[in-house]
Image: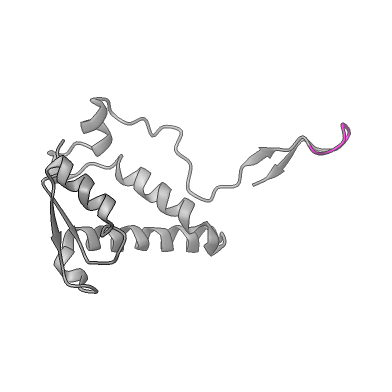
Amino acid sequence: MKIKHLRSDRGGEYLSTEFSNHLKSKGTERRLTTHDTPEHNGVAESLNHQLLERVHAMLHHSGLPKFLWGEAILHAVWLKNRTSTRALKNLTPFEALTSTKPNLSNLLEWGTKVWVHDDGNSKLEGRSKIG
């Protein structure tokens, strides 16, 4: 797919000359909004808010430390891509991309305790630890 327009809020991450040249070479038009006005980019800001709410809920429910927020958001996005949406006529983004239904039969609750292999112990000690 070709990106026709890229909207950003002048935050700096998309303003380099190199990136501007890349956009031009791909035929993408840059649209800059006023800095610190998330209401101008409602769809993206709504998604960010929704994902952060899920991260907060997952961290709170699991009791895991806040520094795992990156892993939590990756999991939240993974789940979102496997959840149906009206925009894709009740398909999941995964299904739209791969033409196969996602298999969620082995999905565990985020934060579930697991056994992690640990071969640093002697041969008479345990070979795994809870993670």
Q: Quadrant of the N terminus?
A: top left
Q: Is residue 21 left or right of residue 76?
A: left
Asked which quadrant contains residue 85, the reply is top left
Magenta residues, as a range? 120-124
Q: Is residue 47 above or below residue 109?
A: below
Which residue sits at x=28%, y=34%?
Answer: 94
- Is residue 121 a member of the stretch shown in magenta? yes
Q: Main secondary structure of the magenta part?
A: loop
Where residue 120 appears, as percent x and y from the top left, is 80, 38
Which residue sits at x=22%, y=45%?
Answer: 22
Asked which quadrant contains residue 98, the reply is top left
Q: Is residue 120 left or right of residue 10?
A: right
> Which residue occupies the foreground of this view, 113 or 47?
47
Q: Is residue 94 left or right of residue 42?
A: right
Where residue 51 appears, as percent x and y from the top left, is 33, 57
> Which residue occupies the foreground of this view, 123 or 106?
123
> Which residue occupies the foreground of this view, 108 or 18?
18
- Is residue 91 a member of the stretch shown in magenta? no
Report the colour scheme.
one colour
Where residue 100 appears, as percent x and y from the top left, is 27, 25
Q: Is residue 72 left or right of residue 116?
A: left
Which residue sits at x=28%, y=50%?
Answer: 18
Number of numbered discs visible in the structure rendering? 0
